[in-house]
Amino acid sequence: MIAILIFSLIIFLHELGHFVAARCCNITVEEFAIGMGPKILSRKSKKSGTVYSWRLFPIGGFTAMKGENEEVDDEHAFNNRPWWQRLIVLLAGALTNILSAFLVMAVIVLSQEHFGSTTIHSFPPDEKGNMTSSQTSGLEPGDTILKVGNRTIHVWTELAYAIVHDGIEPLDITVNRNGEVKVIKNVVFPTTVEDGIKCGMVDFKIYGMKKTFGTVIKETVFQSLSYVKWVYEGLYDMITGRYGMEAVSGPVGVVSAIDNTVKQEKGYSYLPTLFVLISINLGVVNLLPLPALDGGRIVFVLVEAVRRKRISAEKEGVVHLVGLAVLVALIVFISIFDIIDLFS
């Protein structure tokens, strides 16, 4: 139930973004629906003519605009609006998801008593009393880490991710040591294998950082931007083969992950973070230049802006129809693996 509510809220915000942008651009919205399948409740606005509906299956939703998928002889139809207005409408859904994730991230940050810094406090020895890998490689207490490899580091979450993702090989670490910028070459971190994926491990402790107006803004901005970058990196890692099918989840896998989180002690406290992750994932993936997604439609609008000539609605419709079929097949395929994992 919690998973369905989170999905419904994220999709509602996505479609609300399209809806508000369409209305601002004077485009006729024929229906604004939450859910898919048969209508349960519906109401038609006497002023705008828009049908507001609640449908049976609470996963999904849509904003149906006049002239969205066909040529309609009406100045208020989507197909007859200037290209830049159509671009705004198409971008609005994903941007609303990303913006709402930023706002929830701000709430998460404000609720924290203090933050982790990027300055090394100490290196806890292992069970045998040996020095840690990164300490023997040249890092020292008091070092403020500025870069990990080619990644610029602003906040602790970026630092932790950089080491986990890239620390499977020796890395050049740029630090501020006593006011002087130094590059420590070939720093080695310990590694572990999680679900068949090799990851680096942070082997030092960091100083805490007081919560001030400036640190709240910094943490909110850079943590949110990091999530956006991590989505793209995750997609790249799947394409290049670092992550296999076991690392990919469809709707069933996401629902299972949410349910498992809620069942854990204090699991509800992690729901805002899950909201941020899922919302940013939806926003970023929707902007990919693939047929049937908002990003695919944006490509056609941009091509029109460059050519100053629109591609016929019929040809564009065929491309998106094929893309939708492939997308649905992919979701079903991934969901099968999710279901197998649930019972394995």
Image (tube, rainbow, N blue to C red):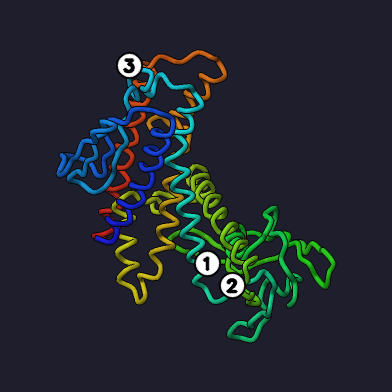
**Between 261 and 273, the one nearer to me in the picture:** 273
The residue shown at (38%, 28%) is 27
The residue shown at (38%, 64%) is 271
Can you give x and y, in whole percent of width and height, for residue 67 in the image? 33, 22
User: In this orientation, does residue 120 appear?
Assistant: yes
**Between 263 and 198, the one nearer to me in the picture:** 263
Calculate the distance from the C-alpha at mark 3 to the C-alpha at mark 1.
48 Å
Which element type, helix, strand or loop, lies under badge 2? Answer: strand
Where is mark 2, residue-wise? 115
Is the residue under label 2 in contact with that under label 1 (CB below 8 Å)? Answer: yes
Calculate the distance from the C-alpha at mark 2 to the C-alpha at mark 3.
55 Å
**Mark number, residue 109:** 1
Where is mark 3, residue-wise? 72
**Which quadrant, please, contains the N terminus?**
bottom left
In the rendered structure, which disc, 3 or 1, sits on the residue that comes first in sequence?
3
Is residue 160 left or right of 267 when viewed as pictured? right
Relative to 105, say whether 21 is above or below.
Answer: above
The amino acid sitting under disc 3 is Val
**Mark number, residue 218:** none
Within the image, what quadrant is residue 176 found in? bottom right
Can you give x and y, in whole percent of width and height, for residue 135 in the image? 71, 74
**Between 25 and 182, the one nearer to me in the picture:** 25
The amino acid sitting under disc 2 is Phe
